[in-house]
């Protein structure tokens, strides 16, 4: 109903491995995929864009964080360029959020807040990307994942430490924030406000000239609107897949290997118990006991949490041992001592006090070697296959790093190569029919392909444990404006629409003049010599308007107008002009027991929590002290946008 957006901090290493992502109460820390960790441009990486307290924020960190954020935004707008992202304020926003993250962490350390090694270990073990075939944390998978992303254990731990410290600093400030019901009711009634009026469109195409433009007119329009005809960058992808078919060694496990795995993991096959539960972590014992009491009396834990502006977390199925590593033994003891459907006794971990409702209890019987044989064999087979493929991929990667070409590597390994048609950054075929897109195996590679240099192959795993791809950008056509002679028809059509828009604007002026003289919008539209689409009556509430999946500019305008007025709104791409007439506003009404009150109460609590968090971060910035280096920031901006240093 109402979307309340939480603030996001820019993680130094991103979310390529879901590292550093901590779901907080009212505030979340997030960033994009892990970017390149190499040096950039002429900067050494030791220049500072800012000093936060005693900690330096380097140009390399800002560049990487901006790359991460840009890739996130580009997922929704694949044709977006870095230049557009930076010019629209992306770099400034990334820098602000990066400095906020460092400042909060520094402030926490000033107060003596720490994230211990055991707590960081538990966070790492909870990340699903680091789990092995048996679903448990695997040190081998952890090391391989970090190596693949160019990270180190120290970087991961420092980033997690920053996030955990920030959580301990910010959560108490935003915890349990609530507006009085009188204020909630005042705003909630606006959702029931009803507006009645009319909306019409004066289409430019109805006023477009019938004759073609002169050569002089066409050239002048082309020169003035060149960027509108920009052809986006296109790239072809040459690729070769390799996988299990290239493996020559046997990956079938032996009976001795199966038996040894069973004996080494005997605990997995003993009788055990898995539990699934809903968890809420709060900073004070008093709050935890209050929530536990309300839920014990029949209230929903999720609803109680939402009313306080908090969020619950679904855990499990999980064993007692695994949960003890995530929280601690005291919390695990409380959770695994409570019955199904009950609320566990309150226990404390380094993150706070746990309020836990037991949703399900699953008892698992012990299994013999014979019963577990097939499962173990499958796991060993998958591990052997994964290991062999990883070794093969490493061999190919070494050849890539040594400078061998795509063709030489493919020929040496007898790989079948394929080349796509020219592709756009969204994976669609340039100049193709609707729906023409890159092959399915190439789709996950598109984002990287548009950041590669031509003729520099890379490898990627496209199907976990089964298929890898060797690929390169084989032909790059940069974004450019084509010559007028190649797009004369398109330019002519756009000129006609632009000329039609001028006449449509004059017509809309005449129509608005009649409306202000007392005519209805429908009557004023009919008075035009050109037959226009009829005005459409509209009657809806603000709540209905906000439930629309896509923003509707003329309807949004109606809810920003005064009763008895009429306004004009330009349609995009010279399509014409919307005319909006608001005739009547009916004030909304809401009762205390209206379900909307509950939703508004939760929503505005989250909004207030966010405001508290924003105010605290501003105060922290002042307390810690931030000194920016304008020259270094400008240098990063130039490097990102490809501008010269002069």
Image (cartoon, rainbow, N blue to C red):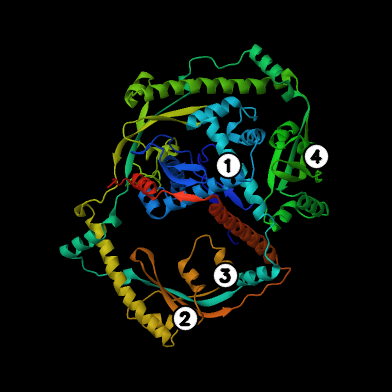
Residue 334 is marked as 4
Is residue 270 shown left or right of residue 625? Answer: right
Q: Identify the residue at horizontal 60%, vertical 45% (top origin).
A: 110
Element marked by disc 1: helix
Farthest top residue in view: 256
Compute the Cα span from label 4 to label 2.
Answer: 64 Å
| Marks 2 and 1, how far apart at CA | 53 Å
What is the number of the mark on residue 543? none
In front: label 1 or label 3: 1
Q: Earlier in the sequence, mark 4 or mark 1?
A: 1
For marks 4 and 2, the one nearer the N-term is 4
Front label number (2 vs 1): 1
CA gap, disc 2 and disc 3: 18 Å
Query: Crowding near pointer 3: few (<14 within 10 Å), some, many (20+)?
Result: some
Measure how far apart labels 3 and 4 are at the Cα level. 47 Å
SS at circle 3: helix
Residue corresponding to mark 3? 542
Image location of residue 42, percent across then percent down: 33, 38
- Residue 565: numbered disc: 2
User: Nearer the N terminus, badge 3 or badge 4?
Assistant: 4
Q: Earlier in the sequence, mark 2 or mark 1?
A: 1
Camera-near label (4 vs 2) is 4
Tell me the crowding category of disc 2: few under 14, some 14 to 19, or many 20 or more residues within 10 angstroms, Cα based.
some
Dot label at residue 162: 1
Q: Quadrant of residue 370?
A: top right
User: Nearest the camera: 430 or 425?
Assistant: 425
Q: Nearer the viewer, residue 313 or 271?
A: 313
In the image, is residue 391 above or below residue 348? above
Judge by depth and name the residue closer to the eye, 63 or 136.
63
């Amino acid at each position: 109903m109402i979307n309340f957006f939480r603030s996001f901090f820019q993680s130094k290493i991103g979310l390529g491995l879901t590292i550093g992502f901590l779901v907080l109460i009212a505030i979340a820390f997030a960033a994009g995929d892990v970017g390149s960790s190499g040096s950039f441009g002429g900067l050494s990486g030791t220049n500072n864009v800012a000093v936060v307290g005693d900690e330096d924020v380097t140009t390399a960190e800002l560049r990487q964080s901006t790359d991460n954020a840009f890739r996130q935004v580009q997922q929704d707008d694949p044709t977006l360029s870095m230049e557009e992202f930076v010019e629209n304020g992306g770099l400034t926003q990334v820098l602000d959020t990066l400095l906020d993250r460092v400042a909060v962490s520094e402030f926490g350390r000033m107060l003596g807040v720490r994230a211990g090694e055991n707590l960081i270990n538990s966070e790492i073990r909870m990340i699903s990307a680091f789990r092995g075939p048996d679903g448990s944390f695997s040190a081998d998978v952890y090391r391989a994942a970090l190596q693949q992303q160019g990270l180190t254990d120290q970087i991961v731990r420092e980033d997690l430490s920053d996030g955990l410290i920030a959580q301990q600093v910010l959560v108490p400030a935003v915890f349990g924030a609530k507006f009085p019901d009188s204020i909630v009711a005042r705003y909630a009634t606006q959702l029931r406000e009803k507006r009645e009026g009319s909306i019409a469109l004066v289409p430019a195409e109805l006023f477009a000239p019938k004759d073609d433009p002169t050569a002089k007119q066409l050239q002048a329009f082309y020169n003035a609107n060149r960027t509108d005809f920009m052809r986006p960058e296109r790239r072809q992808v040459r690729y070769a897949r390799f996988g299990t078919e290239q493996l020559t060694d046997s990956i079938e496990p032996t009976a001795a290997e199966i038996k040894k795995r069973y004996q080494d993991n005997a605990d997995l096959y003993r009788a055990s118990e898995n539990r699934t539960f809903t968890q809420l972590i709060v900073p004070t014992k008093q709050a935890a006991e209050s929530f536990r009491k309300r839920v014990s009396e029949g209230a929903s834990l999720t609803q109680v949490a939402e009313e306080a502006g908090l969020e619950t977390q679904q855990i499990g199925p999980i064993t007692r041992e695994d949960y003890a590593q995530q929280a601690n033994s005291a919390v695990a003891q409380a959770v695994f001592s409570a019955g199904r459907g009950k609320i566990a006794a309150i226990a404390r971990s380094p993150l706070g006090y746990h309020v836990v409702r037991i949703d399900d209890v699953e008892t698992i019987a012990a299994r013999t070697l014979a019963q577990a044989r097939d499962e173990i064999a499958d796991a060993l087979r998958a591990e052997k296959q994964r290991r062999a493929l990883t070794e093969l991929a490493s061999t190919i990667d070494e050849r890539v790093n040594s400078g061998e070409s795509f063709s030489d590597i493919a020929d040496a390994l007898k790989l079948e190569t394929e080349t796509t048609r020219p592709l756009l950054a969204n994976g669609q075929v340039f100049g193709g029919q609707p729906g023409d897109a890159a092959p399915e195996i190439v789709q996950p590679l598109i984002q990287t392909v548009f950041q590669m240099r031509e003729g520099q192959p890379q490898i990627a795993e496209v199907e976990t444990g089964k298929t890898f791809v060797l690929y390169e950008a084989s032909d790059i056509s940069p974004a450019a404006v084509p010559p007028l002679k190649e797009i004369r028809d398109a330019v002519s059509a756009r000129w006609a629409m632009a000329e039609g828009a001028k006449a449509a604007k004059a017509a809309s002026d005449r129509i608005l003049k009649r409306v202000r003289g007392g005519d209805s919008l429908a009557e004023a539209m009919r008075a035009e010599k050109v037959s226009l689409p009829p005005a459409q009556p509209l009657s809806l509430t603000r709540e209905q308007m906000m439930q629309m999946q896509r923003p509707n500019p003329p309807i949004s305008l109606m809810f920003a107008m005064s009763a008895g007025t009429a306004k004009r709104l330009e349609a995009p791409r010279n399509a014409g002009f919307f005319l909006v007439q608001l005739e009547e506003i009916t004030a909304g009404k809401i009762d205390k027991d209206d379900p909307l009150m509950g939703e508004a109460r939760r929503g505005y609590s989250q909004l207030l929590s966010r405001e508290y968090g924003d105010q605290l971060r501003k105060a922290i910035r002042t307390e810690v002290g931030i000194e920016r280096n304008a020259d270094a920031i400008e240098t990063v901006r130039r490097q990102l946008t490809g501008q010269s240093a002069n």
